[in-house]
Amino acid sequence: MGSHLATLGLGGNIGDPAAAMARALNLLDTLPDCTVTEVSRLYRTPPWGKIDQAWFFNACAQVRTGLSPEELLDACLSIERRMKRERLERWGPRTIDIDILTVDGLERRTETLELPHPRMVSRGFVLKPLADFAPDLIVSGRSVADWLRDADVTGIEIADPGTDWWRRRAASGV
């Protein structure tokens, strides 16, 4: 099996979402045949979709993996379950959310996975962190930077300007 380059979107707004995302990234990085190669800055973002809830923390990451897209999805869902993610309402509060955004530029639609992520190009809270390390990534015919120019980024703030925030939090136990 070959190696794949995938991008992921992470977020949460219950408990300590930044610590949860750091833990999720570290769990992904320790999977056999999966290495986190890039991580965005950490962002604080207003709720989207369902707006009567706490603000979110969001980030994006890139992983190199030998897992197929479906196996990577299974791994992400397993990490969410391990971290006690409950899916109670669409766009509702969550401890952790890990979405596969892209894999090798593939376009695919199955019952469980759609690539690229079908709503990523309309979400500033995905595009802004993704542009930290992949502004030239082509998604649905346009670069991430181009999509970002048209996206609503109102209220999105940098919560941690470093791209090693996830390693620092893991090392400190936060």
Image: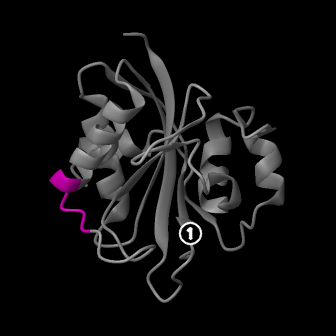
Residue at point 39% right, 71% down?
13
Residue 98 in the figure: left or right of residue 154: left
Which residue is nearer to you in this view: 104 or 32? 104
Rendering coords of residue 170 (x, y %): 27, 44
Residue at point 36% right, 77% down?
89
Which residue is nearer to you in this view: 34 or 22? 34
In what quadrant of the picture does the C terminus appear?
bottom left
Circle 1: is it few (<14), some (14-19), or many (20+) Cα within 10 Å? many
Residue 140 in the figure: left or right of residue 129: right
In what quadrant of the picture does the N terminus appear?
top left
The answer to whether residue 152 is above or below residue 31 is below
Amino acid type indicated by mark 1: Thr
Rendering coords of residue 62 (x, y %): 50, 33
Which residue is nearer to you in this view: 141 or 153? 141
Quadrant in the rendering for residue 53: bottom left
The magenta segment:
81-86
Residue carrying label 1: 45
Rendering coords of residue 155 (x, y %): 67, 74
The answer to whether residue 39 is above or below residue 20 is above
Tag 1 secondary structure:
strand
Residue 99 in the figure: left or right of residue 81: right
Which residue is nearer to you in this view: 53 or 15? 53
Residue at point 39% right, 47% down?
112
